[in-house]
Image (spheres, rainbow, N blue to C red):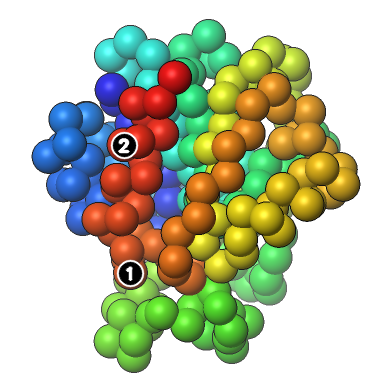
């Protein structure tokens, strides 16, 4: 199965390299995506540009596929389900949740000079970054691509309720499946509360398992792609 891999804020497609190699060995065709404005030099990119790139990648895939979103890009994966529900066999969300309609995509940190730069590690102290050693942190910060303001502050638009028919796998890194299920059941994650099928899977990692647990993450994604 084709598996589209979408990284979160500040990441380009290369962050998936080790996950992709394992997925290939397991018989799947990974498609790591470098988003407009996050690695392709398009500093003026907008959220619509990123949604368009995701939809184009879905349209280019062979047959039905699984779309994987990480962190903030869980919203992009869910937008793919909204735009192309008939093409998606499954959506996998890693360490994040879909943004509701009419809400900003990722207005989390200061925007200066038209971009939202990586804010350093202080906001991520605790379980999110606990498994990243000093070398990994330095490499992440050096490679981090500032996110254009038009992306970070773009407004999510969801229009097709058929997205709720697309099965979801929620991969839980710095939180547990039990916590995720509690949030969903309480209605704190409205989009997932309305989804017809949500399976929660644990991974013993921080917020960036594609860096710290790439083989384990790939096996989880392969199993999700192969499950009914």
Residue pictured at 37% horizontal, 45% vertical: 220
- The label number, if any, that marks residue 1 in the structure image: none
Distance Cα–Cα, label 2 vs label 1: 18 Å
Q: Is 168 or 20 nearer to us in this picture?
A: 168
Q: Is residue 177 left or right of residue 99?
A: left
Residue 142, given in percent of the width and then of the height, sits at 33, 78
Residue pictured at 51% horizontal, 62% vertical: 173
Residue pictured at 47% horizontal, 82% vertical: 130
Residue 71, given in percent of the width and then of the height, sits at 55, 55
Callout count: 2
Q: Which residue is mark 1?
A: 212
Q: Is 49 or 171 nearer to us in this picture?
A: 171
Pointer 2 local density, CA inside 10 Å: few below 14, some 14–19, many at least 20: many
Quadrant position of residue 113:
bottom right
- For the residues labelled 2 and 1, say whether their Cβ atoms are less than 8 Å apart: no
Residue 204, above or below 198:
below
Q: Which residue is mark 2?
A: 222
Q: Is residue 129 left or right of residue 176?
A: left
Pointer 1 local density, CA inside 10 Å: few below 14, some 14–19, many at least 20: some
Residue 171, given in percent of the width and then of the height, sits at 51, 49
Does dot 1 land on a helix, a strand or a loop? helix
Q: Is 139 or 216 nearer to us in this picture?
A: 216
């Amino acid at each position: 199965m084709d598996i589209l891999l979408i990284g979160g804020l500040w990441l380009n497609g290369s962050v998936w390299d080790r996950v992709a190699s394992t997925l290939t060995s397991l018989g799947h065709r990974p498609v790591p995506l470098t988003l407009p404005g996050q690695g392709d030099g398009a500093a003026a990119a907008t959220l619509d540009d990123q949604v368009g790139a995701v939809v184009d990648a879905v349209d280019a895939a062979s047959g039905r596929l699984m779309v994987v979103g990480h962190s903030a890009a869980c919203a992009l994966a869910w937008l793919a389900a909204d735009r192309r529900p008939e093409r998606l066999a499954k959506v996998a969300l890693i360490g994040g949740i879909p943004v509701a309609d009419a809400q900003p995509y990722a207005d989390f940190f200061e925007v200066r000079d038209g971009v939202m730069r990586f804010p350093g590690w202080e906001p991520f102290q605790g379980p999110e970054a606990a498994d990243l050693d000093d070398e990994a942190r330095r490499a992440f910060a050096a490679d981090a691509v500032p996110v254009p303001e038009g992306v970070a502050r773009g407004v999510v638009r969801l229009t097709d309720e058929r997205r709720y028919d697309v099965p979801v796998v929620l991969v839980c890194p710095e939180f547990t499946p039990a916590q995720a299920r509690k949030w969903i059941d309480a209605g704190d994650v409205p989009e997932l509360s309305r989804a017809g099928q949500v399976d929660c899977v644990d991974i013993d990692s921080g917020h960036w398992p594609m860096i710290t647990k790439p083989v384990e993450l790939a096996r989880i994604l392969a199993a999700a792609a192969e499950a009914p």
